[in-house]
């Protein structure tokens, strides 16, 4: 059980907390910290929570965060409704309050949330479903009560934690307002999952994914392209496609593996026992994955700069041909053209087949390639180095 690491370290309320990460789709969301850090913290490719300890936050503290944020949002709304001199005075008062706020995080969260239209909330950190159901339900209730405009509440969860909840608990959470769960499946291959110490098997992922869907909660699954390295690239593609086909989640999000020096997997890379895929090999894995995938999900490949081919995104199975066509297009490019695309993409300037027709963008990429003496021998290392700066 994940609970082995759980420590309740929050005897006193110290104000609103904001955790370190959120899914890209939650950029506009209110980030509500229900737990701290990751209860597993052993995945060999992940350095997000290294050196930290997991803990649950007290229900009362999370409720206090919601109230503090909602109180400030209400003040912003009140000020916005005024006109003329009264509005100016209210804004001056708000600015004063922002400057001297005791709970700066509440103010920061409120302003961010207000700018984001008050529509979605993300429960942080890495596995908030570990919170007891009887604590989560009132938290979801308070969110609904204080933010009636909220349309979506989401959370990360580990597959094992999902399996520890009963069907009734998951349905109760859905009824209380939990709309979507993000699960880091990462791979459907038992060999890859074991190598990466993911703490879950293909079967566990399939069972958990189906359970989330059966409860009526939307499911978003993550696939790490290249997680098997060159050694198990085919296995990673085929087994992940098979697991996801058996689950048929609402969303599949692709992440391309990158290995920063601080994660345990970097030792394998240095020892030569794990070989990272280059962009061409990654595209080959993506193509095999797509060819073996039989789902009705949205495949999202365009929400992170780490991914090479953002155009290979869309609704399956309707857009499958177009999406595989994008990958085949890249694979069929001559080496120099692939180089132009890769350099342009990693700089965030060339992101599509159309961009490749843009003379100005091409000239820019070519000047980088020629000016920095980039060639077939050094481009993989250069790109890998650039990608490490993205995580
Ligand atoms: S469960 Fe998620 S956050 Fe925790 S170590 Fe694994 S990848 Fe990182």
Image (spheres, helix red, strand yellow):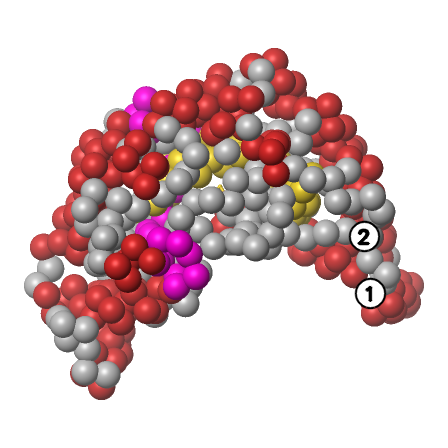
Disc 1 secondary structure class: helix
Q: Is residue 61 above or below residue 260?
A: above
Ligand 1 contact, mark 2 (Cβ < 8 Å): no
Disc 2 and disc 1: Cα gap in Å? 15 Å
* Sequence-first disc among 2 and 1: 2
**Does residue 243 appear in this view?**
yes
Residue 349 position, x and y percent, is 33, 68
Residue that label 1 marks? 98
Q: Residue at x 25, y 52 (%)?
A: 274
Q: Is residue 22 left or right of residue 265?
A: right
Disc 2 secondary structure class: loop
In this view, the residue in front, 380 or 30, is: 380
In this view, the residue in front, 137 or 131, is: 131
In this view, the residue in front, 273 or 256, is: 273
Residue 14 position, x and y percent, is 82, 52
Q: Residue at x 32, y 41 (%)?
A: 195
Single out the residue that lies furthest toward the bottom.
371
Residue that label 2 marks? 15
Q: Which is more foreground, mark 2 or mark 1?
A: 2
Instruction: Determine which quarter of the picture holds residue 333.
Output: bottom left
Question: Quadrant where the C terminus lies?
Answer: bottom left
Q: Is residue 233 above or below residue 176?
A: below
């Amino acid at each position: 059980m994940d609970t082995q690491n759980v420590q309740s370290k929050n005897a006193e309320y110290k104000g609103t907390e904001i955790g370190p990460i959120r899914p890209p789709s939650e950029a506009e969301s209110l980030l509500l910290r229900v737990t701290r850090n990751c209860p597993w913290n052993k995945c060999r490719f992940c350095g997000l929570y290294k050196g930290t300890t997991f803990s649950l936050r007290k229900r009362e503290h999370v409720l206090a965060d919601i109230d503090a944020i909602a109180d400030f949002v209400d003040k912003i709304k009140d000020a916005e409704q005024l006109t003329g001199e009264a509005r100016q005075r209210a804004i001056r008062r708000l600015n004063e309050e922002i400057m001297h706020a005791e709970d700066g995080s509440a103010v920061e969260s409120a302003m961010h949330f207000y700018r984001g239209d008050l529509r979605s909330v993300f429960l942080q950190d890495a596995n908030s479903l570990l919170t007891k159901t009887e604590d989560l339900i009132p938290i979801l209730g308070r969110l609904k009560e204080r933010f009636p405009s909220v349309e979506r509440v989401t959370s990360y969860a580990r597959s094992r934690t999902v399996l520890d909840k009963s069907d009734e608990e998951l349905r109760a959470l859905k009824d209380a307002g939990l709309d979507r769960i993000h699960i880091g499946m990462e791979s459907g291959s038992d060999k890859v999952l074991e190598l990466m110490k993911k703490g879950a098997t293909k079967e566990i992922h399939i069972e958990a994914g189906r359970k989330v869907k059966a409860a009526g909660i939307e499911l978003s699954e993550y696939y790490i392209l290249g997680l098997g390295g060159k050694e198990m690239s085919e296995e990673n593609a085929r087994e992940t496609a098979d697991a996801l086909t058996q689950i048929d989640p609402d969303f599949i999000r692709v992440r391309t593996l990158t290995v920063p020096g601080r994660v345990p997997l970097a030792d394998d890379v240095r020892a030569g026992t794990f070989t990272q895929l280059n962009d061409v090999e990654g595209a080959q894995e993506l193509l095999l994955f797509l060819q073996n995938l039989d789902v009705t999900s949205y495949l999202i490949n365009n929400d992170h700069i780490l991914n090479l081919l953002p155009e290979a995104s869309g609704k399956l199975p309707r857009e499958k041909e177009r999406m595989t066509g994008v990958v085949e297009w890249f694979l069929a490019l001559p080496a120099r053209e692939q180089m132009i695309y890769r350099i342009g993409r990693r700089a965030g300037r060339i992101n599509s087949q159309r961009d490749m027709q843009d003379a100005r963008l091409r000239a820019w990429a070519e000047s980088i390639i020629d000016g920095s003496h980039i060639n077939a021998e050094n481009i993989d290392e250069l790109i890998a180095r650039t990608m490490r700066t993205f995580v």
